[in-house]
Image: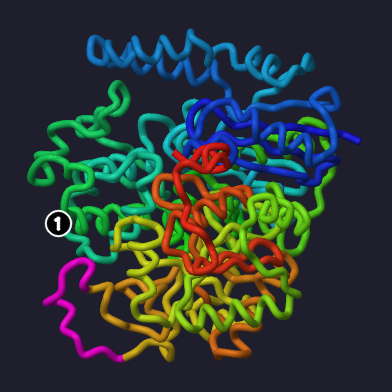
């Protein structure tokens, strides 16, 4: 038996993944345990969980692998600062402290934190992304594109995967980076880099693409083969925490938007324009990948692969017959890619692609049995009912139909940024005020973003113009024509959120202003509990779609344990909570007070 531990850490979204004889046993992000969003520290808790899930200790590990090469990264930072000197002295001093303070001793740190004395292997960052995209994919051979901010030097790579081999064909190197260009706009539009990219993508449909030419003429030169160069006069990111230069602001008519201040039409137009430029680059890269690899299928990973609008467009362009996106496409997924790489590439073990894929629905985290849940509830005298599966589904389906918001906590936690039905908050997408209720009373977040729909995989074509599956909520597709409602509202007279409040389909809570939706197809094979609930909802109330949003509030990572789920339930206006087979009603609960011991125990703040 060969146990391999993959680790990604020390940049953002650290994670651990355990592979046994080539099978993915467990994978989880550190933030879910430490409760610090995007936690980048060495994933001690996530590693402990992975080892426990496999029933082993660190001494039983045959290989440990890190997802990038810190020395190469350090070399890039030194060389970049030398090229820009004397600019960036401060940022270089700060980086030096970080690197000499620990990052250069990654191997020793890993050994020490694991109490492990064996060898530590290092994969290259984009290679780890590429391996996370290809090895678990359903394809025996495929073209592989990885696009992100930056790894060591590469920011974009094109590879070809055949059986257990993966060969890098082309790379684009720092500072020329589509991910960093996108993040520059994220920062300029007033959102947080490395987490606000999603918000900018959600803002884009409100805008007009009036800056596309400005971007293409000044900021990025995109060639026919999808390769690109940034004009570095407009960017400060190589030697500063600031992403953009004064020249950038001058080009777009003034300074960046202050975080949390009012959004204006300019931010909407900038978002839309950058979205279109992203789609242009991704589309050209894909065409080139098809041409030089002659592969009919494509795998994607890297932070830019989380741009599900671009993925949806790529799918509709039919450059490739099939597209598979690694659900943990960001850096967390590097842990999984690196571990699979040790098995297939380093040890040369054969690989047979599985139908669907090898990710087990990305349900790779901790689970809690009904006995554990009821033990917790009883120990705190928390009122609940234990129901049979059938009863539970019928009750929840009826509650949802009546407008209730229900926390749905089942089975193993998801790996990757999306909630896929195990740590999820559900609502009936048909209610016209559900989007508002979820945003303001449950998630406490900006109101301009619609929610995502989960749909029975077999019913997807009845609700969306989507000819493929989207099990990881990484494809945006239009709501089907016959599900749209004819509205007679003059949209040109409406601004921002008022546009979203116009009911434009039978499922308004998950329909964006351009009729798009970020679809999750729910499959019986990978999530029978969620599939059963949707089936009962459809049978009783005629709709195979539910609104599905991650089980957390703004600024916090999704919940991991039943305790965290209960706390989140009590701190929001959620009406019901389902923990495995238990149903809890808010109206039955005593208010959460600040002096309860157990509340302190679960570190609420
Ligand atoms: Fe990355």
Closer to the camera, 412 or 234?
Answer: 412
Q: Is residue 468 above or below residue 88?
A: below
Q: Where, quadrant-wise, is the N terminus in this rendering?
A: top right
Direction from residue 584 to residue 549 in the image, left or right: left
Q: Which stretch did the figure color magenta?
A: 486-498
The residue sitting at 59% across, 71% down in the picture is 521
Q: Residue 128's image quarter?
A: top right
Q: Residue at x 49, y 79 (%)?
A: 464
Decide which of 508, 443 is in the foreground and name it: 443
Q: Position of residue 59 (x, y in %)?
A: 84, 22
Q: Is residue 228 visible?
A: yes
Name the quadrant containing residue 497: bottom left
**Residue at far right of view:** 1
Q: Is residue 499 above or below residue 147?
A: below
Residue sitting at x 38%, y 87%: 484
> Does residue 138 appear in the picture of this structure?
no
**Residue at position x 66%, y 55% in the image:** 377
Magenta residues, dominant SS class: loop
Which quarter of the figure is the C terminus placed in?
Answer: top left
């Amino acid at each position: 038996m060969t146990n391999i531990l993959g680790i990604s850490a020390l940049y953002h979204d650290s994670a651990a993944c355990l592979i046994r004889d080539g099978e993915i046993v467990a994978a989880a992000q550190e933030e879910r345990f430490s409760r610090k969003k995007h936690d980048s520290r060495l994933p001690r808790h996530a590693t402990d969980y992975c080892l426990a899930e496999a029933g082993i200790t660190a001494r039983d590990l045959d290989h440990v692998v890190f997802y990038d090469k810190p020395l190469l990264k350090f070399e890039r930072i030194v060389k970049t600062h030398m090229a820009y000197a004397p600019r960036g002295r401060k940022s270089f001093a700060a980086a030096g402290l970080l690197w000499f303070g620990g990052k250069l001793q990654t191997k020793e740190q890993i050994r020490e934190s694991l109490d492990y004395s064996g060898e530590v292997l290092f994969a290259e960052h984009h290679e780890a992304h590429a391996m996370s995209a290809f090895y678990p994919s359903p394809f025996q051979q495929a073209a592989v594109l990885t696009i992100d901010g930056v790894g060591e030097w590469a920011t974009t790579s094109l590879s070809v995967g055949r059986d257990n081999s993966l060969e890098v064909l082309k790379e684009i190197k720092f500072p020329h980076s589509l991910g960093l260009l996108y993040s520059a706009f994220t920062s300029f539009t007033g959102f947080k880099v490395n987490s606000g990219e999603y918000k900018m993508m959600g803002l884009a449909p409100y805008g007009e693409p009036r800056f596309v030419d400005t971007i293409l003429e000044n900021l990025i030169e995109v060639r026919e083969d999808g390769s690109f160069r940034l004009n570095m006069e407009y960017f400060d990111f190589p030697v500063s925490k600031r992403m953009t230069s004064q020249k950038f602001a001058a080009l777009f008519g003034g300074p960046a938007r202050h975080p949390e201040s009012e959004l204006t039409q300019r931010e909407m137009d900038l978002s839309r324009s950058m979205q279109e430029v992203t789609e242009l680059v991704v589309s050209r890269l894909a065409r080139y990948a098809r041409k030089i690899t002659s592969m009919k299928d494509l795998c994607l990973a890297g932070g830019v692969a989380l741009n599900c609008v671009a993925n949806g467009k790529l799918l509709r362009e039919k450059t490739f017959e099939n597209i598979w996106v690694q659900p943990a496409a960001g850096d967390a997924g590097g842990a999984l890619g690196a571990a699979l790489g040790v098995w297939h590439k380093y040890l040369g073990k054969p690989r047979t692609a599985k139908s669907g894929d090898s990710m087990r629905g990305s349900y790779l985290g901790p689970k809690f049995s009904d006995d554990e849940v009821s033990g917790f509830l009883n120990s705190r005298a928390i009122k609940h009912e234990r129901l049979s599966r059938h009863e539970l589904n019928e009750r929840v389906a009826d509650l949802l139909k009546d407008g209730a918001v229900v926390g749905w906590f089942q089975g193993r936690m998801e790996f990757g940024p999306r909630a896929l039905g195990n740590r999820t908050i559900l609502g009936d997408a048909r209610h016209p005020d559900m989007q508002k209720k979820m945003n303001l009373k449950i998630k406490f977040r900006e109101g301009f973003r619609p929610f995502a729909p989960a749909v029975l995989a077999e019913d997807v074509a009845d609700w969306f113009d989507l000819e493929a599956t989207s099990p990881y909520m990484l494809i945006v597709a239009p709501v089907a024509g016959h599900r749209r409602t004819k509205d007679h509202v003059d949209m040109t007279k409406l601004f921002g959120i008022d546009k979203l409040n116009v009911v434009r389909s039978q499922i308004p809570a998950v329909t964006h202003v351009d009729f798009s939706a970020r679809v999750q197809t729910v499959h019986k094979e990978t999530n029978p509990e969620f599939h059963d609930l949707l089936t009962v909802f459809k049978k009783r109330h005629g709709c195979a779609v539910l609104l599905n949003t991650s089980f957390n509030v703004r600024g916090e990572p999704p919940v991991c344990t039943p305790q965290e789920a209960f706390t989140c339930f009590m701190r929001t206006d959620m009406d019901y909570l389902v923990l495995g087979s238990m149903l809890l009603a808010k109206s039955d609960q005593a208010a959460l007070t600040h002096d309860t011991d157990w509340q302190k125990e679960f570190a609420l703040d």
